[in-house]
């Protein structure tokens, strides 16, 4: 332990908190996101170092070993985890964040090192433990659904809402008993942990796979809130500030996602998009006739257009075709063709999935347009090219009141003069709903792996006079 004055400690914590705020602010734009990520990493490093050197008296070598192992794992994950698996990685990070906050809070009660804990501290312990434990198991269920090791359909348990209410009341009762000096007992903390872990499973299991972007954003918020609770337990201002920032930004993002899907958060938590009994959605492949074409035909249509809008979706991530799309858009721009990318807030399986994917391929940031910016332009666009997107382009969301995606704001791809859809098959989207866009007279289907299809289009466009 190194003797650092309180003034120096507070100044360093203030610098760390300021860097967190600036970092999160810069994450709002793809153009500044990398800088924001680095600033936030530096902020975390400062907070960790000052805490370790100030408060660690023994076994500092184990902390150093832990830091090295964690840094090594982080480097490996950053290099080898594919973009298609990034939502799963975020879910795992959320679970670890929640678990860490719960463990830190519990440690303060299980192994007290100072005077008897106050009611406020015990309440903070209960809060951080509850939220952290729910985040742990909820995030693992979200990971399982994203990885499809757990069914993406909602698992609707009988009387699930009644069970959840009983569990939450029980958690509240034991939390109160833990906080009261005359009844406080560490055994209550173990009961709180067990009940909270079960609640985490039960609140995510009923949610359909198509709602997972919302769930990931919400669980990310939970992990930040749990961190803030642990900060109150430790009396650590930078943990309170950073946890509050993550919690608040996660809630804002969750609100944006639910608005983009025309759904309330309560509706997400109690239902889910997936096929339920009586739903009109189906996971069977479409058998009605469609118009198909080849890469050569698609290249011919693109080569003689004046304006093109690319609409990326999860299929683009699966095929890892982002670099080929960027190359194709570059060739079109060389021919004087206007090129833009339409980004739906819930395209992919994670908030910002498409933005990150295209940024990786160095697609210019000013060509990435969100739903509100781009929707009015489809009517004036010669060709809309859909690459692996499904539910976010389905026009039945406007008209079919029986559809589980009814009312969800979609990209107006069907209003373009011509549509080319790159897809492996006619299988329905993650919501289990067939896309009526594919059946329009103006739509041409280019079947096959998106990467191979785009590479074929690149070759043909390059050969056009």
Image (spheres, helix red, strand yellow):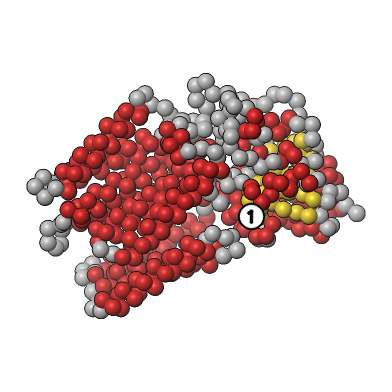
Q: Quadrant for residue 327, please give it.
A: bottom right
Q: Quadrant for residue 430, please give it.
A: top right
* Residues packed near mark 1 inside 10 Å, few (<14), some (14 to 19) or many (20 plus): many
In the displayed structure image, the side of residue 315 where residue 457 appears, left or right: right
At a point 69% along the width and 49% down the height, the residue shown is 374
The residue under label 1 is 358
Quick one: SS at disc 1?
helix
Where does residue 350 sit, x and y in percent of width and height?
A: 53, 47
Above or below — where is 348 with respect to 77?
Answer: above
At a point 52% along the width and 61% down the height, the residue shown is 27
Where does residue 405 sit, x and y in percent of width and height?
A: 57, 33
In the displayed structure image, the side of residue 380 where residue 230 appears, left or right: left
Res 220 seen here: no
Where does residue 107 sit, x and y in percent of width and height?
A: 21, 55
At a point 33% along the width and 56% down the height, the residue shown is 227
Extreme-right residue of the structure:
465
Res 140 seen here: yes
Task: Say which quadrant the N terminus sits in.
Answer: bottom left
């Amino acid at each position: 332990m190194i003797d650092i004055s309180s003034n120096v400690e507070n100044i360093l914590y203030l610098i760390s908190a300021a860097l967190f705020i600036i970092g999160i602010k810069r994450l709002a734009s793809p153009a500044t996101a990398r800088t924001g990520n680095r600033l936030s990493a530096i902020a975390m490093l400062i907070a960790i170092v000052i805490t370790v050197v100030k408060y660690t008296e023994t076994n500092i070598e184990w902390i150093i070993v832990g830091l090295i192992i964690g840094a090594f794992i982080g480097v490996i994950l950053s290099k080898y985890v594919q973009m298609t698996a990034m939502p799963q990685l975020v879910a795992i990070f959320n679970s670890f964040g929640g678990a860490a906050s719960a463990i830190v809070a519990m440690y303060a009660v299980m192994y007290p090192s100072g005077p008897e804990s106050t009611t406020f501290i015990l309440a903070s312990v209960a809060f951080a433990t509850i939220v952290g434990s729910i985040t742990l198991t909820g995030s693992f269920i979200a990971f399982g659904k994203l990885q499809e090791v757990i069914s993406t359909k909602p698992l609707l348990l009988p009387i699930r809402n009644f069970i959840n209410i009983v569990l939450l009341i029980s958690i509240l009762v034991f939390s109160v008993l833990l906080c009261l000096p005359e009844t406080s007992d560490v055994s209550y903390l173990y009961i709180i942990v067990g009940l909270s872990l079960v609640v985490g499973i039960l609140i995510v299991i009923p949610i359909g796979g198509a709602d997972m972007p919302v769930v990931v954003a919400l669980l990310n918020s939970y992990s930040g809130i749990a961190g803030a609770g642990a900060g109150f337990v430790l009396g650590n201002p930078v943990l309170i500030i950073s946890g509050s920032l993550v919690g608040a930004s996660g809630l804002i993002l969750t609100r944006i996602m639910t608005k983009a899907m025309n759904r309330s958060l309560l509706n997400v938590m109690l239902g889910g998009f997936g096929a339920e009994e009586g739903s009109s959605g189906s996971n069977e492949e479409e058998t009605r006739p469609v118009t198909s074409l080849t890469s050569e035909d698609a290249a011919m249509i693109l080569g003689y257009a004046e304006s093109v809008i690319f609409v990326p979706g999860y299929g683009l991530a699966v095929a890892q075709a982002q670099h080929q799309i960027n190359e194709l858009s570059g060739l079109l721009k060389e021919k004087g063709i206007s090129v833009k990318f339409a980004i739906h807030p819930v395209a992919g399986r994670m908030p910002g999935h498409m933005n990150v994917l295209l940024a990786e391929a160095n697609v210019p940031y000013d060509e990435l347009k969100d739903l509100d910016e781009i929707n009015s332009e489809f009517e004036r666009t010669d060709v809309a090219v859909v690459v692996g997107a499904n539910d976010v382009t389905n026009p039945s969301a406007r008209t079919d009141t029986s559809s589980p995606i009814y009312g969800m704001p979609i990209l107006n791809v069907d209003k373009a003069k011509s549509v080319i859809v790159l897809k492996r098959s006619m299988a329905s989207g993650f919501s289990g709903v067939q896309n009526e866009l594919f059946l329009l007279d103006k739509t041409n289907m280019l079947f096959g792996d998106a990467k191979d299809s785009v590479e074929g289009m690149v070759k043909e466009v390059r050969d056009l006079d």
